[in-house]
Amino acid sequence: MPATTPSPAAGPWRGWRCGICGERIGVYEPLVHVTGEGPVRTSLAAEPALAELPDAGAACLFHADCHARVLTRA
């Protein structure tokens, strides 16, 4: 079982979608997780615990490119 898949007891993992573009975030894709301390650049492969975030926490996940485009426009 891949490290990014929660145990079967947790139910099927549906994956996360980018909070900006709405497309699925791949396991190995660079992503930005915005926390209370600021943005953290990582991936779901590097931090498997992100797969277990509740929906509210997952709203803070973005493709790294999408996040960079939004920052550039600001």
Image (spheres, rainbow, N blue to C red):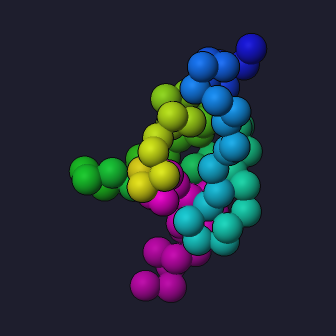
The residue under the point 47% across, 75% down is 71
* Residue 29 quadrant: top right
Which residues are drawn in magenta? 58-74
User: In this view of the protein, which residue sits in the foreground, 18 or 11?
Assistant: 11
- Is 1 on the left or on the right of 55, as rendered? right
Q: In this view, does 25 lie above or below 74?
A: above
Q: Is residue 66 magenta?
A: yes
The x and y percentages for residue 48 are: 55, 27
- Is 34 on the left or on the right of 20, as rendered? left
The x and y percentages for residue 72 are: 50, 78
The residue under the point 47% across, 41% down is 53
Q: State the quadrant of the N terminus.
A: top right
User: In this view of the protein, which residue sits in the foreground, 27 or 64?
Assistant: 27
The residue under the point 64% across, 29% down is 11
The residue under the point 73% across, 63% down is 23
User: In this view of the protein, which residue sits in the foreground, 20 or 46?
Assistant: 20
Q: State the quadrant of the C terminus.
A: bottom left
